[in-house]
Amino acid sequence: MKAEFVNPFLTSMTNVLTTMAQIDSQPGKPTVKKTSTASGVVTGIIGMAGEQLKGSFAVSFSEPVIFAITKRMLGEEVSSVDETVIDMVGELTNMATGGAKALLAEQGFEFDMAVPVMISGKDHRIEHSSSGPTIVLPFNTEYGDFFIEVSFIPAA
Amino acid sequence: MKAEFVNPFLTSMTNVLTTMAQIDSQPGKPTVKKTSTASGVVTGIIGMAGEQLKGSFAVSFSEPVIFAITKRMLGEEVSSVDETVIDMVGELTNMATGGAKALLAEQGFEFDMAVPVMISGKDHRIEHSSSGPTIVLPFNTEYGDFFIEVSFIPAA
C-alpha cells in the first residue's frame, strides 16, 4: 500500500469536520501500524472494494470529540454514546469515505463502498490482519484527539 | 434487505468451521437486530460492495470458541486474544465471506470484498447505522456460542 493513499482520507476527514461541524483538525504524522491501537470509545469502520485494490477505513473518536461534533452538527447535547452518537459516527464514516473515494477516483482508483459498522466500548482495540500494512494517522482538535486508519491491499 | 441473504453466510460459516476446524455449529433463529448486541471478545468485520447492494458481515467469538477453533486449525494452544487469534479471526472472516460471496453470485448478486478489520476488547458492542436492517444469527457449538451479523442495503 502506498502511503499516498492516506492523503485522500486525511483531506476528506478534515473537510468533513470543517464544513459540517466547523471544527478544525490538525493531522499528525502518519505511521505504519505495528501493534494494535488503543482506540477511542466509538469507532466507525467501512470497507471499500475495487478491481485493483480492496481496503478498509476506520475512524475512532474519544467522547469529548464526538460529543462536540454531535452538538455542532445537530445542536444536540449528548453525554453518552447513544443511538444519536452512533448514527453520527456512521454518517461521518460515510462522508469521509465518500470524499476519499472521489479523490481516489481522480487518481484512477475506483471503489464501491460497503456500509459502515460502528463499535463502541471503553476498551476496544482495532486490529488488522497481517495481509498488508495499515497506516494510522492521529488528528488533534480543540476537544482532543481522534485517529483514522487506512489499509489497502491488491484485490485478488 | 431480504432475510434470505443471511442463508449464504449461515451456510458458509458452518462449512468453514466443519471443514477447517471439525467443529459442528447449530444456527439459532435469525432476528432483526433492534438494539446493539453485546458481542464476544473478538469480532471480525468485512465490507462487501456490489453494483446492486452494499453491506457488511461481522462474526463475533467468545474466548472458549475462538481458542478451540485456533487449536483445531493450527494445533496451537492459545489462552489470550493475541496476534495468532486475531489473524485466525481475520482468516475465518475472509473464508466465510468468500464462501457467501460465491453463493450470492449464484443468485445473481456480485460483490467485491474489502479487507477484514478485527475488534478486540471485553466490552465492545457492534452497532449499525439506521440506514437498513441488520440480521443477527446466533450459533451454538460444544465450546459455547458465537454470532454473525449481516446488513445489506441497496447501493446508491
Image (spheres, coloured by chain):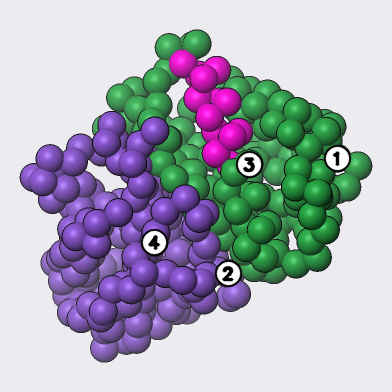
Chain colours: A purple, B green
Question: Relative to residue B23, is residue B80 drawn left or right?
Answer: left
Residue A136: give x, y in percent of width and height. Answer: 35, 69
Residue A60: give x, y in percent of width and height. Answer: 41, 69
Name the front one of labels 4 and 2. 4
Q: Amino acid at mark 1?
A: Thr
Q: CA distance from mark 3 to mark 1?
A: 16 Å
Residue B138 seen = yes
Residue A83: give x, y in percent of width and height. Answer: 49, 60
- The residue that label 4 is drawn on is A134
- The residue that label 2 is drawn on is A124
Name the front one of labels 3 and 2. 3
Name the front one of labels 4 and 1. 4
Residue A151: give x, y in percent of width and height. Answer: 36, 55
Q: Chain of mark 3?
A: B
> Going 91% across and 42% down the picture, which residue do you hit?
B142
> Going 32% across and 30% down the picture, which residue do you hit?
B155
**N-terminal label among 3 and 1:** 3
Quarter where residue B97 is shown: top right
The region drawn magenta spans B93-105
Q: In the image, which disc is placed on residue B141?
A: 1
